[in-house]
Image: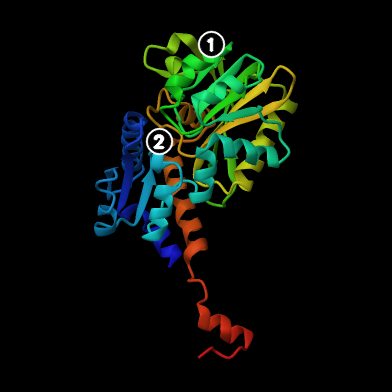
């Protein structure tokens, strides 16, 4: 059955899910457009966009596709909620599952997960309200960020309590928890990873963002902020450091049970430590010329059309492994153990 589906995969009815209700909606719509064009160029004949919102998501039940390609950024599209819904209605989807998505979307829990693997992480102080700031005993500089927000929304570099309070008043609007994180002096790196049809993570050439400011914030990422940074691919790294970064990212990818493709943001500290800061489970594909992930693919020698095809192949194979058989029911369990069925 799986072999037949794979052979005829380019005839499958595929929705490219994009848009959503999060603050990252504009970027998601552009990512959706990019993926849609790549799928068509790869020979997929029955594909179309689906702008999923809280008002229309039930249409996925009525007009059920064979597979969905996720290009949502932030909110319920990236935090496991949509993934859980798609599993409930038994629609295969690209990308990581519910748990990996939920952990990665929350910067507090992802930090703790990485730490549990024995890797260094920036120290975090969590506050639930602005009033908590007055009782803090922390050193500066720090980075303040919402716990559950992407695209650098609400992320600021602060050098004192006054700046912290000022920025916190704005950042708290994005999340019910704020992270006041240790600032790591060092280099800003990005690692792209995608899963091939054999289920193995493929590490792409590492990118370095050379900054003219302390962090890669929203002002730098916003159109017109290109003069504030320069992206270099591949990053100039010592061979030992590069191997260590790739090994760490591969370990996290597997331990978190990631699928599809992800982008991990890293700080290479001046002290030599490698800090995995964030894991983006649905990285932006806003522009094949400007977005980091497609640039890393191309420099790594991969055709973008082959990449989307490989993503769909790995999705179909993973889905078949997970759901090819229903879990045993109570009667089967009783019979297996040789027990008498209760009256």
Q: Quickly name the residue at label 1.
A: 162
Which comes sooner in the sequence, label 1 or label 2?
2
Image quarter where the N terminus lies is bottom left
At 43% from the left edge and 53% from the top edge, which residue is drawn? 84
- Report helix, strand or loop for mark 2: loop
Q: Is residue 245 left or right of residue 294?
A: right
The structure's colour scheme is rainbow
Q: Nearer the viewer, residue 71 or 185?
A: 185
Q: Quadrant of residue 186?
A: top right
At 38% from the left edge and 39% from the top edge, which residue is drawn? 72
Q: How many numbered markers are drawn?
A: 2
Which circle marks residue 154 in the picture?
none
At 58% from the left edge and 91% from the top edge, which residue is drawn? 340
Q: Position of residue 103 (x, y in %)?
A: 54, 43
Q: Quadrant of residue 62?
A: bottom left
Specify few, some or many for label 1: CA neighbours under 10 Å numbering under 14, 14-19, or 20 or more. few
- Report helix, strand or loop for mark 1: helix
Q: Is residue 340 above or below residue 108?
A: below
Q: Is residue 228 left or right of residue 333?
A: left
Q: Is residue 197 left or right of residue 46?
A: right
Q: Quadrant of residue 86?
A: bottom left
Q: Nearer the viewer, residue 159 or 231?
A: 159
Q: Is residue 50 left or right of residue 207?
A: left
Which circle marks residue 73 in the picture?
2
Q: Nearer the viewer, mark 1 or mark 2?
A: 1
Q: Position of residue 63 (x, y in %)?
A: 24, 56
- Residue 205 visible in the displayed image: no
- Residue 62 visible in the displayed image: yes
At 42% from the left edge and 50% from the top edge, which residue is drawn? 83
Q: Position of residue 289 (x, y in %)?
A: 40, 24
């Amino acid at each position: 059955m799986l072999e037949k589906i794979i052979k005829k995969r380019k005839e499958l009815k595929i929705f490219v899910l994009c848009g959503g209700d999060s603050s990252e909606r504009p970027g998601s719509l552009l990512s959706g457009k990019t993926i849609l064009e790549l799928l068509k160029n790869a020979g997929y004949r029955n594909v179309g966009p689906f702008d999923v919102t809280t008002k229309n998501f039930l249409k996925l039940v009525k007009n059920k596709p064979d597979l969905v390609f996720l290009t949502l950024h932030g909110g319920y599209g990236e935090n496991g909620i949509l993934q859980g819904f798609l599993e409930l209605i038994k629609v295969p989807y690209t990308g990581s599952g519910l748990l990996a998505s939920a952990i990665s979307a929350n910067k507090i829990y992802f930090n703790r997960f990485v730490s549990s693997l024995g890797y260094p992480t920036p120290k975090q102080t969590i506050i639930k309200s602005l009033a908590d700031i007055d009782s803090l005993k922390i050193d500066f500089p720090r980075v303040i960020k919402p716990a559950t927000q992407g695209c650098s929304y609400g992320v600021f570099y602060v050098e004192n309590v006054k700046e912290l309070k000022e920025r916190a008043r704005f950042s708290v609007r994005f999340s019910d928890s704020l992270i006041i994180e240790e600032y790591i002096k060092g280099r800003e790196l990005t690692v792209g990873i995608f899963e091939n049809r054999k289920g193995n993570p493929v590490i792409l050439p590492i990118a370095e963002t050379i900054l003219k400011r302390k962090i890669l914030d929203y002002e730098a990422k916003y159109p017109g902020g290109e003069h504030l940074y320069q992206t270099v691919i591949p990053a100039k790294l010592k061979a030992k450091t590069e191997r260590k970064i790739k090994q760490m990212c591969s370990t996290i990818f597997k331990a978190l049970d990631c699928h599809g493709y992800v982008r991990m943001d890293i700080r290479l500290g001046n002290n030599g430590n490698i800090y995995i800061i964030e894991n983006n489970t649905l990285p932006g594909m806003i522009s094949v010329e400007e977005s980091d992930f497609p640039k890393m693919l191309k420099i790594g020698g991969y055709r973008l059309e082959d990449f989307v095809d490989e993503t769909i192949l790995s999705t179909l194979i993973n889905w078949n492994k997970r759901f090819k058989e229903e879990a045993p029911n109570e009667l089967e369990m009783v019979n297996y153990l040789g027990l008498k069925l209760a009256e």
